Image: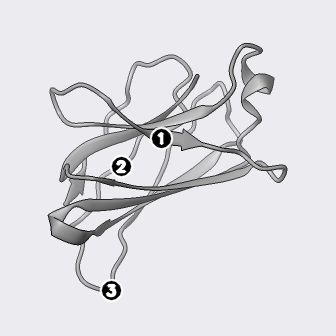
Amino acid sequence: MTIVARNHLFAFIIAAAGVLGGACAGASPEVRMVSSPDIPAAEGVVRATSGANGNTRLHIFVRHLAKPEKVRPDATTYVVWVQPAGGLPQNMGALKVDEDLRGSLETITPLKSFDVFITLE
C-alpha cells in the first residue's frame, strides 16, 4: 500500500502524508504529517496497515493541535480526509481534540494509494 505525498489546497490544512512503503505482517508503516503555518506546533503521524478484505486500516494520531475555535472562531471540529490521485476527497470522520491537545482517529478505507489530510470545519 502507498500513501502519496502531495500538499492539498484546502483551507486550514493541518497535514499531508508522505510516502509509505509496502506494509508487511507485524509492521505498521508510520508517516509524519506536515503542519500548516496556521497551526505550526501541531504534530501528527499516520500508521497504515492491511485490514480485513484487503482494506487499508488508518490510525491517525495528533498532538499540540489547538482547539478548533482557537484557530477559527466558527470552527467546531477537525475532519480527516483521504483522496485518491485524480479523485474526490472522502470524509473519513471527525478527529476530536482532548484537553491535552491530543487527538486520534482509527478508520478503514478500500483505497491503496491516497493522500491524507485534515481540515478545520
Foreground residue among 27 and 50: 50
- Callout 3: helix, strand or loop? loop
Specify the label residue 93 is tagged with: 1
Residue 84 falls in which quadrant of the image? top left
Specify the label residue 21 is tagged with: none
Nearer the camera: disc 3 or disc 2: 3
Q: Earlier in the sequence, mark 1 or mark 3?
A: 3
On screen, residue 93 above or below 60: above
On screen, residue 120 above or below 109: above
On screen, residue 15 above or below 2: above
Q: Are marks 1 and 2 in contact (CB under 8 Å)?
A: no
Badge 2 amino acid: Gly
Query: How far is the residue under mark 1 from the one under mark 2?
Result: 20 Å
Badge 1 amino acid: Gly
- Callout 2: helix, strand or loop? loop
Q: Which residue is mark 3?
A: 26
Residue 94: x and y in percent read 55, 39
Q: Pick the quarter of the image with the C terminus.
A: top right
Residue 42: x and y in percent read 66, 43
Q: Residue at x 82, y 53 (%)?
A: 100
Q: Residue at x 33, y 62 (%)?
A: 57
Q: Which residue is mark 2?
A: 18
Q: Residue at x 51, y 27 (%)?
A: 13
Q: Residue at x 74, y 23 (%)?
A: 71
Q: Earlier in the sequence, mark 3 or mark 2?
A: 2
Query: How far is the residue under mark 3 from the one under mark 2?
Result: 21 Å
- Callout 1: helix, strand or loop? strand
Foreground residue among 24 and 92: 92
Badge 3 amino acid: Gly
